[in-house]
Image: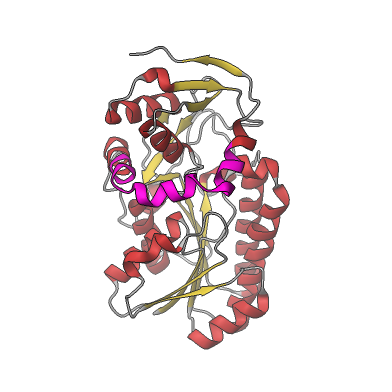
Amino acid sequence: MKNILVCGGAGFIGSNFVRHMLAKYPDYLITVYDKLTYAGNLDNLLDVSQNPRYSFVQGDICDAAKVDEVISQREIDTIVNFAAETHVDRSLMEPGSFIMTDVYGTYVLLEAAKKHGLARYHQVSTDEVYGQVVVGASCETDRLETRSPYSASKASGDLMTFAYHTSFDVPVTITRGANNIGPYQYPEKVVPVFVTNAIDNLPLPLYGDGLQVRDYQYVLDHCEGIDLVLHRGTLGEAYNLGTGQETRNVDMAHMILDLLGKPRSLIQYVKDRPGHDRRYALDCAKIRALGWQPRHDFAQALEKTVRWYVDNEWWWRKIKSGERWQEYYKKNYAGRELTGQAKAG
């Protein structure tokens, strides 16, 4: 394993993974393959753009001919697939694009891995494939019970990945990560929306009662876990990645406002989204047995994330001032019946 194709490497988690791998493995060559949709952004990779071991190819994982061409020309031996449509809210608006990228695109990459006899195919998945977990924690062998087009498309990709291992002996691994926060996260997800809105004294649109429970992990901790599974994980196995620390969304919003010195009255409760999972929780004993543990607890991860957005307005202001982002924001939040506003303090 030396010549890695990182699909979706210009996105949030993918770009952080590229940065991690280039820093840790001085002999590895990294090719980023990305369609550069709204969430793919070469600004995410500016700091490694001059690294001689990094290269970029613009392309769609659904384009089998292009994928084959890149693998052959770059002598790729490993694929790590971050490429996906990822936002639940968008999947409720346009489920078809999620099926194409997350299911058909995964199939194209698995076919390529089989055809070229690659050393490893790694699928980056999500805890959302388990559905909401009212009590307890999900382990890797639990039933997949998806509740949104996004989670259904990711679960389908997981099942296809396992099928190619069983049917064709493609050497695969999967990681299922909890919610990520950190640098370069596109400001449609809850933490960067809340942070950037708070900086500008705009309302923080909090779904429902705000008591949904999530495990927020720092993106670089997640990348270290993927790296470990890529090198030491058992073929044909999935591994959960999370901190095990549960946080209610309303508490996360309070912490952001407190870090920025903003009033809690900025929180604006809005109508909940359809099928909103109440709680996710992961049993991460399997990855911990390999020697992984997160370097950041939630408070540390959130503080680092908030400080990054404060220090890097050049990155997110270009996005939020763009027509594409504004159109999405209006479409997602306009017309939602307000259910109240938080009290100050």
- The answer to whether 287 is drawn above or below residue 274 in the figure is below
Residue 17 position within the rendered picture, expressed as x and y whole percent measured from the top left: 39, 62
| 149 relative position to 238: left or right | right
Residue at point 49%, 81% (across, down)? 76
Can residue 144 be seen? Answer: no
In front: 191, or 110? 191
- The answer to whether 314 is drawn above or below residue 79 in the figure is above
In front: 249, or 79? 249
- The answer to whether 232 is drawn above or below residue 117 in the figure is above
- The answer to whether 331 is drawn above or below residue 6 in the figure is above
Residue 88 position within the rendered picture, expressed as x and y whole percent measured from the top left: 60, 42
In magenta stretch: residue 345: no
In front: 181, or 138? 181
Residue 300 position within the rendered picture, expressed as x and y whole percent measured from the top left: 26, 39
Q: Quadrant of residue 4?
A: bottom left
Magenta stretch, main secondary structure class: helix
Residue at point 37%, 59% (across, down)? 16
Q: Quadrant of the N terminus?
A: bottom left
Q: Quadrant of the C terminus?
A: top left
| 153 relative position to 314: left or right | right
Can residue 214 be seen? Answer: yes
In front: 310, or 161? 310
* Number of callouts: 0
Q: Which residues are magenta?
A: 306-329
Residue 36 position within the rendered picture, expressed as x and y whole percent measured from the top left: 54, 63
Color theme of the render: secondary structure
In magenta stretch: residue 313: yes
Q: Quadrant of residue 329?
A: top right
Residue at point 28%, 68% (across, down)? 23
